[in-house]
Image (cartoon, rainbow, N blue to C red):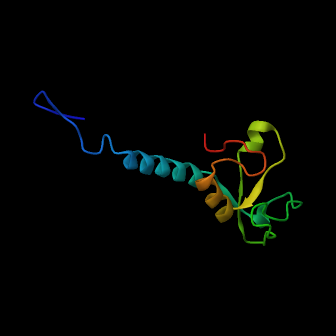
């Protein structure tokens, strides 16, 4: 809402639901981008050998994301290819393994 010289004017986008949806999607993308990624070969624990989404083995130079849900729930860590989990989180917003909401 805009106020000019005491008169109130409604912005044409104030009641547009598509603007709200776009803003929500931008916030979701920012949260996904803030989940840090690491190179697979820098992981100390090598018994996680494949992405649980695409079921492809991790290669030495793959970017891998570790979801923060394991910290909250004290569970094993959940590793994914960065691109796989980024796409998943845009659609679902939860860990595909334990269903923890990782975009809070």
Q: Is residue 2 placed above or below 36 in the rendered structure?
A: above
Q: Residue at x 83, y 42 (%)?
A: 75
Q: Give the total of numbered labels.
A: 0
Give the x, y percent position of residue 17: 39, 45
Extreme residue toward the left, this view: 5
Of 68 and 2, the residue lying toward us: 2
Q: Is residue 7 left or right of residue 75?
A: left
Q: Quadrant of residue 65?
A: bottom right
Give the x, y percent position of residue 40: 76, 65
Give the x, y percent position of residue 54: 75, 66
Q: Quadrant of residue 68?
A: top right
Q: Is residue 54 placed above or below 29 in the rendered structure?
A: below
Q: Is residue 16 left or right of residue 33?
A: left
- Quadrant for the N terminus in the image: top left
Q: Residue at x 61, y 44 (%)?
A: 103
Q: Is residue 33 left or right of residue 81?
A: left
Q: Is residue 27 left or right of residue 1?
A: right
Give the x, y percent position of residue 69: 73, 43
- Quadrant for the C terminus in the image: top right
Q: Is residue 25 placed above or below 57 in the rendered structure?
A: above
Q: Residue at x 66, y 44 (%)?
A: 102
Q: Quadrant of residue 16?
A: top left
Q: Residue at x 64, y 65 (%)?
A: 83
Of 103 and 21, the residue lying toward us: 21
Extreme residue toward the top, this view: 6
């Amino acid at each position: 809402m805009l106020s000019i010289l005491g008169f109130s004017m409604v912005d044409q986008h104030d009641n547009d639901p598509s603007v709200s949806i776009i803003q929500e999607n931008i916030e979701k993308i920012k949260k996904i981008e803030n989940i840090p990624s690491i190179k697979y070969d820098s992981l100390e624990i090598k018994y996680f050998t494949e992405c649980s989404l695409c079921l492809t083995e991790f290669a030495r130079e793959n970017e891998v994301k570790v979801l923060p849900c394991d910290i909250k729930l004290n569970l094993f860590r959940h590793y994914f290819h960065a691109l796989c989990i980024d796409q998943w989180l845009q659609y679902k917003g939860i860990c595909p393994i334990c269903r923890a909401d990782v975009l809070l």
